[in-house]
């Protein structure tokens, strides 16, 4: 574990937001075990979006979990949360303890290989707490993750490690975009858990 080799209070953004990277917060063995359990135990579904009136089904798969059957709408489609699994609750509680925040929901993404990524976007849907905290836990393939300022276009990238925790808070979603760029490198699947607070 390299939790204490990093300073999680260091802000990776130069301005207009706060991003902290804790690095690996669980051991390699624990990360491997959670990865296998989530890969097999989560109710994965292909993601759907309506863009410019066209219905698109992605290769990437998603799942939406929470305290209750919360609705969550993005890309003009709505999902209803499933109740937490034991593994998700354990990872949520660990993340909450380290971050010092509480979450009531989690959006999971499954990227099968390097070809699958996520375009530039902000997690600023009306259902989410404005300027709230989002905890992003990565399992599986190590992938590049990028930020770009909406006005200045300044960009910052880092590699998200297996079993690592990234935190976005403050005005990050208001002022910055983020993405997971695709890559031609051959990667094993990656699971990303983004713990969030839905306004209820």
Image (tube, rainbow, N blue to C red):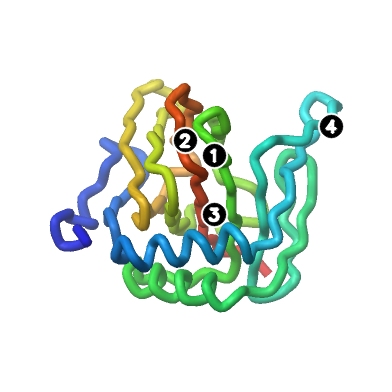
Q: Kindly identify which numbered label has been placed on residue 25.
A: none
Q: Which residue is mark 4?
A: 55
Give the SS element for disc 1.
Answer: loop
Q: Answer with the quarter of the image where residue 31 lies.
A: bottom left
Characterize the local packing of mark 1: few (<14), some (14-19) or many (20 or more) Cα atoms within 10 angstroms: some
Whether tag 2 and tag 1 are in contact, CB under 8 A, the answer is: yes
Is residue 177 among the parts visible in the rendering?
Answer: no
Q: CA distance from mark 2 to mark 3?
A: 17 Å
Q: CA distance from mark 1 to mark 4?
A: 21 Å
Q: CA distance from mark 3 to mark 1?
A: 12 Å
Q: Is residue 150 above or below residue 160?
A: above
Q: Position of residue 120 (x, y in %)?
A: 53, 30
Q: Residue at 14% across / 56% down in the picture?
A: 5
Q: Kindly identify which numbered label has been placed on residue 178.
A: 2
* Front position among marks 3 and 4: 4
Q: CA distance from mark 4 to mark 2?
A: 23 Å
Characterize the local packing of mark 4: few (<14), some (14-19) or many (20 or more) Cα atoms within 10 angstroms: few
Q: Position of residue 199 (x, y in %)?
A: 64, 65
Q: Which residue is mark 1?
A: 122
Give the SS element for disc 2.
Answer: strand
Left or right: 72 as drawn, with respect to 151 = right
Q: CA distance from mark 2 to mark 1?
A: 6 Å
Is residue 7 among the parts visible in the rendering?
Answer: yes
Q: Kindly identify which numbered label has been placed on residue 130.
A: 3
Give the SS element for disc 4.
Answer: strand
Q: Residue at 40% across / 33% down in the picture?
A: 147
Which of 111 and 107 lies nearest the eye of the viewer?
111
């Amino acid at each position: 574990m390299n939790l204490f080799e990093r300073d999680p209070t260091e802000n990776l953004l130069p301005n207009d937001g706060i991003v902290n990277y804790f690095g690996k917060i669980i051991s390699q063995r624990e990360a491997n075990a959670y990865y296998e359990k989530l890969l097999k135990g989560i109710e994965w579904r292909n993601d759907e979006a309506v863009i410019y009136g066209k219905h698109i089904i992605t290769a990437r798969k998603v799942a939406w979990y929470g305290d209750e059957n919360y609705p969550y709408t993005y890309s003009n489609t709505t999902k209803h949360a499933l109740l937490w699994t034991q593994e998700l609750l354990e990872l949520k509680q660990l993340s909450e303890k380290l971050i010092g925040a509480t979450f009531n929901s989690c959006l999971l993404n499954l990227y099968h290989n390097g070809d699958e990524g996520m375009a530039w976007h902000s997690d600023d849907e009306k259902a989410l707490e404005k300027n709230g905290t989002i905890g992003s836990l990565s399992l599986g393939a190590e992938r590049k993750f990028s930020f770009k300022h909406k006005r200045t276009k300044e960009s910052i990238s880092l590699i998200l490690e297996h079993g690592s925790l990234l935190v976005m808070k403050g005005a990050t979603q208001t002022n910055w975009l983020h993405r997971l760029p695709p890559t031609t490198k051959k990667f094993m699947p990656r699971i990303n858990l983004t713990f969030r607070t839905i306004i209820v």
